[in-house]
Structures are given as C-alpha cells and as structure tokens.
Image (cartoon, coloured by chain):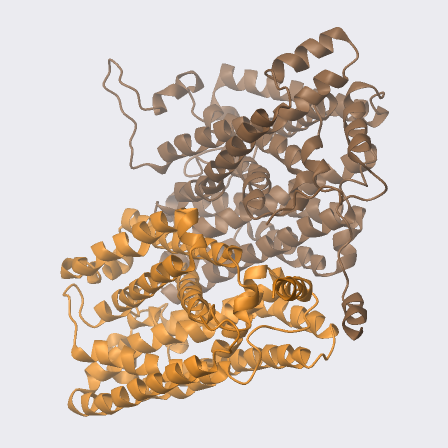
Chain colours: A brown, B orange
Amino acid sequence: METIEQTAVYEQPQPLIGGKHDYGTITDKISSDVLEKKTPKGLFMAFAVTFSLVMLLLLAVTYLFLKGVGIWGIRIPIAWGFAIVNFVWWIGIGHAGTLISAILLLLHQQWRNSINRFAEAMTLFAVACAGMFPILHLGRPWVFYWIIPMPDTMRLWPNFRSPLVWDVFAVTTYATISLVFWFVGLIPDLATMRDKAAQKWKKIIYGMLAMGWRNSAKHWHRYESAYLLLAGLATPLVVSVHSVVSFDFAVGIVPGWHTTIFPPYFVAGAIYSGFAMVLSLVIPVRKLYHLEDFVTSRHLDYMAKVMLATGLIVAYGYAIETFTAFYSGNRFEHDMMINRMFGPYGPLYWMLILFNIALPQLLWLKKFRQTPWMLFVVSIIVNIGMWLERFVIIVSSLARDFVPSSWAIYIPTKWDWFTFFGTIGFFLTAMILFIRVLPMISIFELRTLLPTSKSNHE
Amino acid sequence: MNHFEGPRPLLDRIQQSALVVGGLGACALVVGAIFSAQQFFQSYLFAYMFVLSFAVGSLGILVLHHMVSGRWGFAIQRLIEAAARTIPLMALLFIPILAGLSDVYPWMNQNGMPQGPLMGFKQTYLSVPFFVSRAVLYFVIWTVMAFTLSRWSHMQDQNAGAALTRKMRLLSAPGIIVYVLTMTFAGFDWVMSLEPQWYSSIFGALIIVSQVLSTLALCIIALRLLAAYKPFSGFLKETHFHHLGNLLLTFVVLWAYMQVSQLIIIWSGNLPEENLWYLHRTGTWDYLVVPLVIGHFFIPFFLLLSRRTKRAMARLALVAVFILAMRLADMFWLITPAFHPGEFHIHWLDVAVPISLGGLWLAAFVRNLKGYSLVPLHDPRFEPALERVENAVGAEG
C-alpha cells in the first residue's frame, strides 16, 4: 500500500524507554542505584563542593544576624538588591517541577513520567531557597510571622492590599502543595524500596515512610484519585505564584515595573528558567547514573522545545515592554527604557538579551536539542540569562528614581555573593541527598511507558 | 439521524440563510450609513473586530495545531482552514473602516492626538500612511499563511505524500510567532488606539486570547451541527469534545486572568493616563461589566469544570453559544465606551451591523467548507486514528 510507505517517510518518534527493559529491570535499576550499588565517586566530589557552600551560607547568615542588612550592598533608593533578585530567580526555577508534574499529567504527556520525581524534588528545594531571601531581607527576621494575619494583642494586621502579603500566601500554599504532591507520588515507590531493602533499619525507615502501602487495588484506586486531585490543585499554582510575584513589582508605579504584560511574561520566564535548571541537573545525573534508557534524547528534545517556546514568550514580553515604553510618550517610561539599555547597567541588559533571547535560538536546530552537552551549555546560559533579567528589572529601575538627586548605584558586596552561592550550594546538596536516598525516577510511573503496558488510555 | 449522508444539504441551507440575512442586513446598513454616518462607522468597527476573531483566530489555532498535533485539532482542522480562508473577505470588509477613519479614531484630528515632547513616536506610529501600510501588511501575511497551509493540506488529500506534513510544521513554527506579533499590533492599531493616550502592554495578548476563545466556541458549535453527518459521524467521539471543552475552559480562564491582571495593575497604580480607560468603561457601563464578570467567567468556568458538560456535545455547544454571546458583549465593552465614555449607549446599528457582517461571513465560511473533505486525509499524524475508526465501523456494519 502506498500509504504505509508514505507513513514511513514521516519520522515516527522513538520509544520513550530505550534499550531492552521490562517491569523487573526498571525496578531493579532504579532501586539498586539507591540500595545496593556503590555511590559514584563523582557524587562524593560534588557533595564536597556543595556542602562547603552550605557552610558558607551559614557563615553569611550568621554574620547577617549579628550585623544586619547593612552588610549587603543595598542602599536607598535600591532597597531591593540581591535578596529579591535571588528570591524571584529561585521561585521561578521551582515552576518547572509543578508544570511537569501537574499540567503535563493533565495533558496526558506520558514522557513526563521519566522526569517528574526529579523535577518535583527540585521544586521543593528551589522554593526553600527562595523562601530564605525575603525573610533574611526583613531586617528583623525573627519576627517574620508578623506578616501572617493572625489575631494578636497589638491588633496588628498586615496590609492586605500589598502583594507582598499575597506572596506569603502564594508561596506557602505552593510549598505545601508541592511537598504533599511529591510525597504522595513517592508512596508506592517507598513501598518498593521497603520490600527491596536488605538491611532491617532500611526496611523500617522506608516502611514508615510508605505508610502501610500494600499494593492493593483499593490503595491504587485511592492513590489515583488523590494524585489527580492534587494535580488539579497544583495547576493554578503554576500561574498564580509567579503572577503574584510579578505584582510585587507591577502594582507599584516604578517605571520598568509598572506594566500590564508582567504577569504572563513572568510566568513564562519562570517556566523557562525552571526547565533550564531541570536540564542543567538531569544531563549530568543521567550520565553519572547511566540513565540514558530512561531519560532519552526524546525527553531532552521535548524539554528543549518547552524551553524554546517559553523563551519566545519572554522575548515577546521584552519586545512589547519596549514598544509600550516608547509608544506611551510617558517621560518616565521612556527614560527608564533608554537608561536600561544605555545607562550604567546597560551592558548587563545586552548580556541578558544575548543569553536569554539570542543564544537560545540555537534550540531551533535538532542537533542542539538532542546533543546532551550542547543542550547543557544552552541551559546554563538560560539560567544565567534569567538571573540577569531579574537583576536588570529590579536594580536598573530602582537605581534611577523619580528624583535625580537620589539616584545611586548598587554594587553587591561579598556577603551578597556568599549568600547567593550559599543557596546554590544548599540546593545542590539537597538534590544530591535526594538522589542518594530516594528513587529519583518514579518506578511505577516509568513502567507504564513500556510498550507492554496498556495504560495509555484515552 | 443521517449517519451515512454528507452534510451538503445542511451546509447549503446554512449558506443560503446566512447570505439572505447578510444581504438584507447590508441594505439596512446602507440606510443607517446615510442617516448617521459616524454611528455607522463606530458600530461597524465593533462588529468587524468581532467577526475578524473567527478568521484570524482560526489561523492562530491552525498554526498551533500543526505544532502540537492533538486529536482535537484534526477534528476541527478543515473548519479552521475554511475560516482562515475568509481573511481576504475580511480585508475587503476593512475598506469601510479606512473610509471612516476620522469618524472613529480621535488621533485623526489635531486635538485628539496627544501632544508633548516625547509623543513623536506615537504621532508617527498613528499616522494614516503608516497605519494603512501596516494593515495591508497584516492582511498580506495572514492571507499567504492561511492559503499556503490550506493548499498543502488539500494536496495531501490527493495522497500527495507525508512530506507535506513536515512542510506544514516547518511553516507553522515561525507562523505562530508571526501570528502573535501581527495580531498584537493589529490589536494596538485597531482597538487600543481608539483612546490614543492610553496604553497597556498586555492588550495584544488579551485580544489574541479573546480571538482564540471565540473561534473555539464557533468550532464546537459547528462540530455539533456536523456530528451526525459523514465523515464526522464515523470518528467523532466524546473525547474530542472533552478536549475541545478543556481548551475552551483554558481560554475562558486565560481571558479572565489577563483582564484581572490588567485591572489590578492599573487600579493600584492609579495613574491618570491609565485609569481613564477604566473610568470610561464604568459608570453606567456597569450594566455591562457585571454581566460580563459573571457570564464571561463564572458561569462558563463552573459549567466547564464538569466532565459531563464537556463530554455531552449538545450541552457543550450550548455553553459555546453562550460564550459567543459574551464575546460579543465583551467586544462591545472594549470598543464602544471609547465613543461614549462613562455612559452606556447602544444604537440599533450596534445590533444590525454584527448580524449583517456575521451573516456575510458565515456564508463565506460555509462556502469554503464545501468542496473538500471535512477531515484531512493521509496525514500520517492522523491517519492511524482514522483507519482504526473505519475498520471498527466496517466490523460493526
């Protein structure tokens, strides 16, 4: 038949699991990486570096508590320096995990099964890093709970019209749902670990965490409905959290912050940076643990495409923002844009355009999407680019206030850098511990990707 | 139910009645245009932007469909191709807007154009030659994209090869970018510039989301009408409606999200050059605002959350009809207060022009539907599904 030949001309996608695998080999491979095999040397070396950075974080935070926020580079009018830049950067990174676990689940994107566990863990640790910054920035971090609305003897209430208060709600909800979602998804695998573990103490720990999972049909039934409900709850969070973060800026009238495209463009940027971070982590881990059969080049290709698409939305945001600044004819909008491009922080702006917009266009080429090291390089570039974006938005707008006499330049101090690198160390340490003690790929969900499994219901 | 007949008689009937309504309406419009030219042009712009949604929105969904290749997309592919091929007609219908520029756009007059040292950019951007050449450019780009994609798709029906699928995808990837950019600026030009001092960077995205929502609603209604006939009777299943219903829900939510984002940001900023737009659209316009909030968001949102609504095509089509009515009201709220700030105003032409333009457009759309298979054939992404259905039908019968 002619048709069949022609169908063959059109490239059929490769299977989502490479090599020769069945239910047993998948379970063995993923569980033995945690339970039996020796920890790769590379992991120890990475841990040595990242854990030193955690110590640096402790040092920076201790000194901050002793001295106050004056050790940072912030000064009026630039009251929001690294703390807020890093907060937004980290919270954005978390978004990929929620998108992968919730939205892609609802969209029946089966390929997510290979990476969702990993991405969700990343979300949790990124949110933890993000949460540190606003609290450290408070000046009196020990009374941070004042921002939570609760009846107290002083009759103090937070200002509900302030998006900084919405942030507290958004981020705590986000952290809670992400944690519960991640843990619920882990339960069947924890039971597998319990059953596979050889030593008694491991059996006890995994057994307690598995909460009595016995693999019965009733358990699965309840699990499936709980998981779907949690996915439904998590879906709006993908959009709402970063929209609220964008309101932190946009509801004020600071030029460069006050523009209506901010919410959708921040959300796109969050997913963009999140996927970049997933790729930056998955590519080395895949190599270290020989997971090429489970995280195939097709997975990398899909993630690269999501990155390309969201990156283009971000580019749209930049373009429209620039157009509006000139179209508005507003003195402040106009001067802000000129200042952003050619002012004291101008070079950072052009670096941002290069890193966030120009270079990622390489992903149009299949070669860059499917060659791991090339994709890794692009993902690192995007991570830096998205960090620069937050820096340019926050600092360049604040540095040029409405009143020229109050203009100033912000230069981060070593304590700013220590805190920032410290959180990166904290994040990576947590990731390393996660892949060491828990199955980093969802065993039971991966099994549904096998051709023999007919769970691909419509 | 005529399971084994084509929908030709139904299509003929719709086309004829649409043409009659459109034609009679056009006669009434001539009368209106003679007696109150300014009102005619203002109503015309509102009706035009509503009808344009279907043509250009279809193009947007078409390029998206070629990229994501979901099953829902193949069910409506021929509908959106036919709708996108009405773009030349929309270009023709744009002429009255050009004729009425000075009755509609304040920046045409000296005192309507914002003045100031930094207004040079805006004055150049909103000058007649630039405005007209941009419109020409948009229509040329849209027409070329719509007809190229349609032609390739029809060539594939002749069994011209799976390589065409690759070509369609190759055009659609940059096509999405081009669509989004052109429609954003068309939205700025044709709607946002009605209040030349006002600006909102989310406005283009809002127009795009609204267009896609209108088009999805139209497609659902059309599928519901055609479902009983071949070829749809052979393969349309609840899942198709379920997916389209989910998309409809997504875009209802996106519309609300963008509207609310814009409102929160402008309301809290409270700058005089921005909040005027809302002041013009409230006052007695609240009669429209309140129903829009409830009807354009809450009612469809809660209805579409239910799986039962989405899987029952008759019920889903009813929701779609309701959404289309709300889309019309929303477009009216977006445009008309620019001419009657703060005071609710409706004219008989605001009813007559949409009916007339809608009738003409519907006739053209249905005409475009005829003559080709109503589902794409020989597309390797779709064919396996189609064959399976045909085999199943054969086994049953």
Q: Is residue A359 visible?
A: yes
Residue B242 in picture, x, y percent from top left = 48, 54
Quick one: B29 or A287, which is closer to the camera?
Answer: B29
Along the horizontal axis of the image, is A68 left or right of B203? right
Instruction: Name which quarter of the figure residue A398 lies in.
Output: top left
User: On the picture, is B383 further left or further right than B272?
Assistant: right
Q: Is residue A353 left or right of residue B260?
A: right
Residue B182 shows up from this direction:
no
In which quadrant of the rendered image does the N terminus of chain A lie? bottom right
> Does residue A376 sit above or below B365 in this rendering?
above
The residue drawn where x is 62% and y is 82% is B151
Q: Residue at x 39, y 51 (%)?
A: B304
Question: What residue is at 62 percent from the left and 19 percent from the top?
Answer: A213
Residue A292, compared with residue B341, is above or below; it is: above
**Which one is nearer the viewer's eye here, A175 or B230?**
B230
Q: Is residue B82 above or below residue A340?
A: below
Q: Nearer the viewer, residue B217 or A65?
A: B217
The residue under the point 38% across, 45% down is A405
Question: Residue B332: image x %, image y %?
Answer: 26, 68
The percent coordinates of residue B369 (x first, y second) are: 50, 80
